[in-house]
Amino acid sequence: MLRFLSLKFGRLYRCLKLLFVVSLFVILLMNTHNLFASFQKNELTDRRFINLNKCPACFGNSWCRKFMNGQITFESWGRLRFLDFLNVKNVYFAQYGEPREGTRRIVLKRLGSNQELADIDQKICKRATGRPRCDLIQAMYKTEFSRLNGDVRLLTPEVVEGWSDLVHCPSQRLLDRIVRRYAETKDSGSFLLKNLKDTERMQLLMTLAFNPEPLVLQSFPSDEGWPFAKYLGACGRMVAVNYVGEDLWSFYNAPWEKRVDLALQLVEIAEQLTNNDFEFALYLLDVSFDNFAVGPRDGKVIVVDAENVLVADKRLIKQNKPENWDVWYESRFEDCDKEACLSFSKDILCSRVNVDHNYYAICQNLLSKHATWRGTTGGLLHDPPTEIAKDGRLEAMLDECANPKKRYGRYQAAKELREYLAQFGGNAR
C-alpha cells in the first residue's frame, strides 16, 4: 500500500513538474518580443520604472545620476518583467559599475510589494483629497509629510511616534541621529531639520512611515561596526544596498565547524544590538534565515532585512524610570505552528533596561530545535557530532535560551552558549 502511494505521488510530482515547465515555455513564447526587449533595454534608466516621477513621495535621489547614466543594470533574470510575479518582495540583484573601480554586485529594493506601494499612494491621496487617485506630487504637500516646514527646527518624538517600529518609542537623541545621518541630502551632518529642503523632509518622513530600513542602515552604519548591510543610495522608489553574500539558509547543511562559527556570530549580534556603548537597544522583531547573509570572503554574518527593528533609548528609560524599568524582562516562549514566529510586547521593549528579546529570537528561530523553516526543524546547530550530542551541554543551553525553565535562565544560557561556541568558532572563517 505504501509503495503504491509513493509511486502515485511520484507520478503526480513528475506531472506537476512537467506542467510547470510547459507553462513556463508557453509564457516565454507569448512574451518573445518582450523577452528580447528586456535584454536590450536598461529599464533602470526609465524614470517611471523606478518611480522617480512620484517624488517627493519616494525614498530619495542621491543615486539618480548613476541610474540615469546606465551605471546600474539588472542581472540576467532580473531583466525579465514577466517573471516579476515571482518576486513578491521586489528585491533585485544588479551590477553597479564605476570607470576606475570596475563592476560589483549590489541589491536593489523597492521596500515593499506592488500592493503595499499602491496602498501608500492611495493613503496619500485620500488624506489629501478624499479620493483614492490624485496628483501624487501635489497631494504630498497636503499630508502629514509636509507638516514640518522650514520653520520647524527639530524632528520631535510627538510628531512621528508609532509611525513604524524604528520610532515606536523614539527619543530626541535617536531622532537627531536619524536626521544628522540622513544620506539623501547634500548637507548631511546636521541634526537641524530646517537645514533640509522641503522635498528632502518629505522623503525622510515618507521613508520613516512606509519602511524605515534605509534609515536604520544610515543611522547604524556598517562602517562603524554595526551588523547591517551598507546603504548606498536611492533614486525614486528604488534603494541600493551593498550585496553581502548568500543568505543564512544556504548554510543550513554546511560543515559543523562552519555552522558553529555562524551560530557564535549570531549570538554576538544579539549581544551587540542589546548592550552597546551608545545605549541604544536595537530589537530584531523579524528573525528568519532569509534575513541574514554571510560574506563570501570574511564569512561575516550580516542583517540584510532591517525593516522591523525597534530602537529603545536606554538613557531615556533610565531618566524617565517608568514602572518596573529596572526589572529584568524575560520574553515568553511560544511554541506556535508557524515559521519564524516570535512573542513580544513593543511597549515593554521600550520601557525596560534589561531585555532578553534578541537572545530569545536568535535561539528560538535560528539555533535551537524549536527553529522551523521551509519544512525543516532542528535549527542551524542540528545533528551535532556524536561526542557533543552525548555530552548534552549544547542542547541544554540552546533549550534554556529558547525556552527557559529557570528565572532569568535565558540570560545565563546566552552567556554560557556564547562562551561554549567560542571554543570552536572562528576557525571556519
Image (cartoon, grey):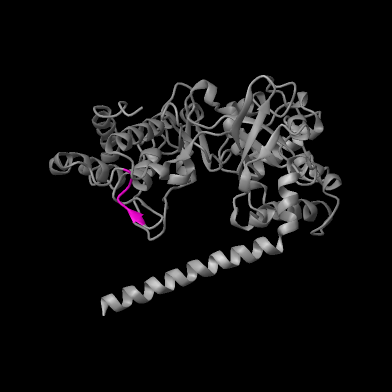
Q: Examine the image and state in which quarter residue 122 appears.
A: bottom right
Visible residue check, residue 171: no
Which residues are drawn in magenta?
Answer: 376-380
Q: Examine the image and state in which quarter residue 327 appears.
A: top left
Q: Is residue 93 above or below residue 101?
A: below
Q: Main secondary structure of the magenta part?
A: loop
Front residue of this view, candidates 183 and 86:
86
Q: How far across and down, in percent of the image, does residue 115 sit? A: 67, 57
Q: How far across and down, in percent of the image, does residue 356 sit? A: 37, 38
Front residue of this view, candidates 337 and 21:
21
Q: Residue at x 54, y 66 (%)?
A: 20
How many numbered marks are there? Answer: 0
Q: Is residue 317 magenta?
A: no
Front residue of this view, candidates 247 and 357:
247
Q: Residue at x 37, y 30 (%)?
A: 268
Q: How far across and down, in percent of the image, does residue 412 sit? A: 26, 34
Q: Quadrant of the C terminus?
A: top left
Q: Residue at x 66, y 43 (%)?
A: 209
Visible residue check, residue 264: yes
Q: Is residue 162 rendered to the left or right of residue 296?
A: right
Most distant residue in the bottom direction:
1
Q: Examine the image and state in which quarter residue 236 appears.
A: top right
Q: Quadrant of the N terminus?
A: bottom left
Q: How far across and down, in percent of the image, does residue 410 sit? A: 29, 40
Q: Is residue 20 rendered to the left or right of residue 233?
A: left
